[in-house]
Image (spheres, rainbow, N blue to C red):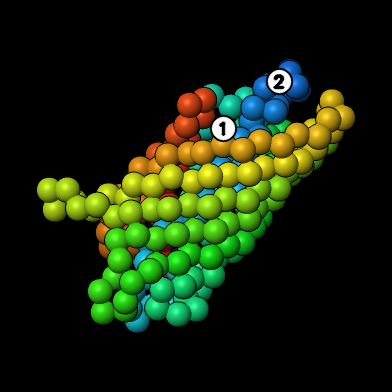
Amino acid sequence: MRTFLCLIFTSLIYSQVVNSEIESINPEQQLKDIKNFSTASTIFSSERLGKNKNIALTSFFVARNQSPSYQRAQVLVGSIKISWNLDLIGRMSSAYSDKNNALNIYGWGISYKPGKEEKISPWSYGINSGVSRLYNINRSSSFSLSIMRSVLLNNYSFSLGVSSINVKGVNYSIGQNFQYNFSNFIIGTTINFSGIKVLPNFTFSSNNSMISIGLQKEF
C-alpha cells in the first residue's frame, strides 16, 4: 500500500508540467486537442475486480507528446463493485498547462461484464461520461461507449477494444461551439507486480494517439 501511494504521488508531480507555449496555440489546434481531452476524461479500467475485493483505485498517467496544450496528465479512477459483473466508476484529474490555465477533468461511468459468475465472459462493456475544462480556452462534455475483449496469446493476456465518443462544447477563445463524433481503438494488457496491477494501454485513431499507464490497487 505504501509503495502504491508513493507511485501515485510521484506520477502526480511529474504530470504537473508547465507548457509555456500554450499562448501560441492557434484555434485550429485547440479544437483538435478536444479529442485528446475527451479520451482522457472518459478513460476507465476494464480490469475485473477480484472475487473478494469491492473497491479499486487506479491512477492513470496519460501522455500525449504531440499536443501543445498539455503533454502529461494524471487521472484518478475509483471503482466500486455493485454486483459481481457491474462496477460504478468515478474519475477526476488536474493537469496544469501554465500559470493562467489549468486542465481539469471529472466524470463517472459503469463497467459491465456479461455471462455467469461461475464462467466469466472475456467481453466487457463501458459507459462513461466526462467533462474537461481548459479555463479561459474551452469546456467540453463527452460520452463514450466501449467494448473490450480479453485475448490470451502465448500465455499472455491482452485487451482489445474500440470506443465511440461523442463530444460537444464551446471554444471561448474563438467564441464557437463544436461537436465531434469519433472512434478509438484500444490495445492493453495487465501486469501484476507486488500486489499492484500495472495497466499499459495504447489508444489510437486515424488522427489521434495516446499512451496511458494505470496503477491499480484493490481493497
Q: Which residue does the image show at 30% across and 66% down from the upper left?
A: 121
Image disc number at residue 28: 2
Q: Which residue does the image show at 40% across and 42% down from the upper left?
A: 186
Distance from Cα at disc 1 to Cα at disc 2: 18 Å
The residue at the far right in this view is 175
Residue 127, horizontal then vertical, whole percent: 55, 58
User: Is 19 left or right of 115, judged from the image as shown?
Assistant: right
Q: Considering depth in this image, is 162 or 18 the residue closer to the camera?
A: 162
User: Is 139 left or right of 192, judged from the image as shown?
Assistant: right
For label 1, the residue is 71
Q: Which residue does the image show at 58% across and 44% down from the upper left?
A: 165
In the image, residue 121 sits, relative to residue 14, either above or below, namely below
Q: Which residue does the image show at 53% across and 45% down from the upper left?
A: 164
Residue 177, horizontal then vertical, whole percent: 81, 34
Q: Quadrant of the C terminus?
A: bottom left
Q: Residues within 10 Å of mark 2 (few under 14, many from 20)?
A: few
Q: Secondary structure at mark 1?
A: loop
In the image, residue 70 sits, relative to residue 87, either above or below, namely above
Q: Secondary structure at mark 2?
A: helix
User: Is 68 left or right of 147, judged from the image as shown?
Assistant: right
Q: Residues within 10 Å of mark 1 (few under 14, many from 20)?
A: some
User: Residue 179 lies in what quarter of the image?
Assistant: top right
N-terminal-most mark, 1 or 2: 2
Marks 1, 2: nearer the viewer: 2
- Three-letter code for the amino acid on which mark 2 is drawn: Glu
- Three-letter code for the amino acid on which mark 1 is drawn: Gln
Q: Quadrant of the N terminus?
A: bottom left
